Amino acid sequence: MAEFKTWSTFWYQEDYEIVEKGYKNKNTFEDIAKQLNENRKSKITERGQICALRSPGAVAHRLRIMGLISSEEVEEFYKTHRKKKAQKRSKGLDKERKLAFNRDGNKCVICGVEENLEFAHVVAYKDTRTNNHKEAITLCKKHHKMFDKKDKDTTVFIFQKMKEYYPEFENDYLFKYQYFKKYNMDKWCIVRKDMIPGKK
Ligand SMILES: [Zn+2]
């Protein structure tokens, strides 16, 4: 077993072979990462080990270490990759923003300011990967910042507001996230219950 304990951190010979083959076939770094991860995932079932998956960026860096691409090409990759990610993130945003702003009377729900309004994800974007207005609220810059810093009063207020709007917030969403406890931080956020591991 000892031999396999390091599987998660090492780049094994077969990893290199997959990366090199993908590169020679002119596959995208995203596709190479996918191929790599399919193989790595199969190792989990086979050996009962969890192994780290590789991102397209990790593939780019590996290709540079292997001398197949230059640092400039890695940089170039990140530029496009970031752009693609941003495009994905803004998907449907205009429409959802309008719905949220209209619902909230085109003002910050906390202080009533009507200028420079922002679309704030009530449930973190990283958890949902969507821009649903039913999980978002209209805030001014200042209150958006406070909410993002997980300020308790701001978060309680927003949670109450969402409960007024949508009855499902009562049961399907939680105000506090246990995760922060282990860092001993007094931080608060709103989560969807079905996203908490073990609470499905
Ligand atoms: Zn405000």
Image (spheres, helix red, strand yellow):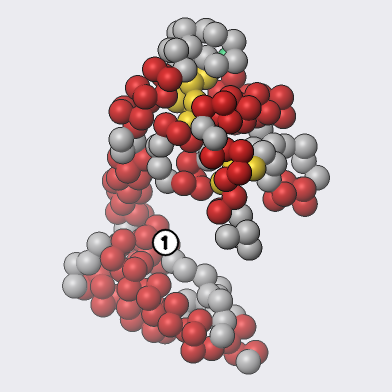
Q: Which quarter shows the C terminus? A: bottom right
* Residue at far front of view: 167
Q: Amino acid at mark 1?
A: Ser
- In the image: residue 107, left or right of residue 174: left
Q: Disc 1 marks which residue?
A: 55
| Image: 63 above or below 156 | below
Residue 19 can be seen, yes or no: no
Q: Position of residue 36 (x, y in %)?
A: 37, 74
164 or 176: nearer the eye? 164
- Residue at 47 percent across and 68 percent down: it is 53
152 or 80: nearer the eye? 152
Residue 110 can be seen, yes or no: yes
- In the image: residue 67, left or right of residue 116: left
Q: Position of residue 187 (x, y in %)?
A: 72, 37
Q: For residue 190, what is the image quadrant?
A: top right
Q: For residue 173, what is the image quadrant?
A: top right
Q: Which quarter shows the N terminus? A: bottom right
Q: Secondary structure at mark 1?
A: loop
- Residue at 50 percent across and 81 percent down: it is 44
* Residue at far left of view: 25
- In the image: residue 83, left or right of residue 113: left
Q: Position of residue 31 (x, y in %)?
A: 28, 65
| Image: 148 above or below 66 | above
- In the image: residue 170, left or right of residue 32: right
- Residue at 59 percent across and 50 percent down: it is 193
Q: Position of residue 65 (x, y in %)?
A: 40, 67
| Image: 100 above or below 64 | above
173 or 76: nearer the eye? 173
